[in-house]
Structure formats: C-alpha cells, structure tokens
Amino acid sequence: MAMPNKFYCINMNKDIIILALSFCLVISLLRAAQLKRSLLKEIRKRLYPLLSLELVKDVTNNNYGLDIKNEGYFPVKNIKVNDLKIAINDCGFRQNVVLRFDEIDELREKQKIRLTIRTFDAENNAIANVETNLIPHIVNINFEVSISYRTIWNTKLLAKFIKKQDKFYLEKITYLKA
C-alpha cells in the first residue's frame, strides 16, 4: 500500500481550514448586518418624541386630572387627544360619557402639563366638575387613548396608550400620512 502524499494531506487540511474560516466570515458579516439594522432602529426610536400619560388622583389634596409629558429629547407640536368614550358606574347606575380634550400647541422636551378635559353625556350635554366627579370613577376602568402629534420635522405620528388599573402603557407608535 502506498502512503498518502504528505503534501496532499497538508493541502487538504488547508482547504478545510479555509472553508471553516470562510463560513465564520459569512456568519460574522450576517451578524454585523443584523446588529447594524438593530442599531438604526434604536436610533430612530430615540428620535421619536415619546409621550406619556399619568392619571393623577391625590385624594388628600383634592388633586385629580390627566397629565401628559414629553419624555423625548425633542419638542412636540399639534398634540390632539382623540375623544374618549367610556362607560362608568356611579352608585350602580351606568352612564356613558365622552371626554374631549383641548388641543395642545407645543410640548417642550421633558415638559409635563395637565390636560384640559371637557365631559359630555350621551346626549352631548356638558357635565360639570369633571376632575372631582369623573376622575375617581375612571381609575379602575381599562380603556385606550389615541394621541396624534407632529415632530419638529413635521412628521405626523399616532401613539396608542392602554390604561390598565391605574397606569397607562404605550402600545404602539405609527406614522400617519400628512
């Protein structure tokens, strides 16, 4: 029997090593592309003005309301909270109400303001004393709130919040056509 050529084995080992290194290079390039896409997505997220909502219910100081805050690093303009239709139970009586919010012209970065709420019943009659009468009733009700706004680059966005228990959670932000 003939012994395999020593140079043939060395060349075969080199080919295997080259193949393995080529495979590792391809995997590394794919992973780098994936990380680049992820980084770009995170950068875009930071450029979004991020709004948050807070339900204020300080019983001791009789301080009730709904606050909106710009958590982002850029100002937001033309903030419009969509009308909110909810059903509340007051002493066993179910009442359908519509909450309408005044539009906000601008909200600077890290600024927080109290939303002005106007409340109407099912027949579109105004209801008085919104903060003290209504806010305590909606603390335990789950509902959705949609807010449309524009960035400083005039991009129109829609943020959808879900209120669960006594906190608001951002569900999603979508682009709207101008």
Image (cartoon, rainbow, N blue to C red):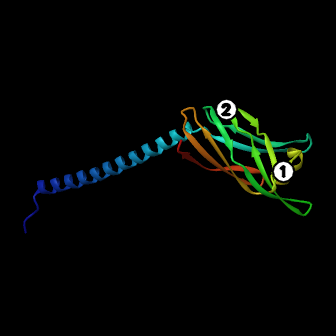
Quarter occupied by residue 156:
top right
Q: Is residue 75 above or below residue 167?
A: above
Amino acid, disc 1: Asn
Label 2 is placed on what type of residue? Glu
Secondary structure beneath dot 1 equals loop
Does residue 45 appear in this view?
A: yes
Q: In which quarter of the image is the C terminus?
A: top right
Mark in the foreground, 2 or 1: 1
Label 1: how many residues lie within 10 Å, few (<14), some (14-19) or many (20+)?
few
Q: Residue at x 34, y 47 (%)?
A: 29
Q: Nearer the viewer, residue 61 or 174?
A: 174
Q: In this view, does 142 lie to the left or right of 125?
A: left
Q: Distance between the residues labelled 2 and 1?
A: 29 Å
Residue 58 seen: no
**Which residue was labeled with disc 1?**
125
Identify the residue at horizontal 54%, vertical 33% (top origin).
Answer: 153
Pick the front one: 142 or 89: 89
Residue 16: name its quadrant: bottom left
Label 2 or label 1, whichever comes before in sequence order: 2
Q: From the top left corner, tell me how far across and down residue 92 is, in percent.
A: 90, 64
Count of marks placed on residues = 2
Category of crowding for the residue at label 2, using alpha-carbon neighbours closer than 10 angstroms: few (below 14), some (14–19), many (at least 20)? some
Q: Residue 172: percent from the left, percent from the top?
A: 60, 50
- Residue 115 position by quadrant: top right
Residue found 54% across the figure and 38% down from its top: 155
Q: What element carries label 2?
A: strand
Front residue of this view, candidates 30 and 87: 87
Does 9 sit above or below residue 114? below
Kindly identify which numbered label has been placed on residue 106: 2
Residue 67 in the image, given as x and y percentages of width and height: 76, 40
Judge from the rendering whether residue 93 lies leftward or rightward of residue 169; answer left or right. right
Location of the N terminus by quadrant is bottom left
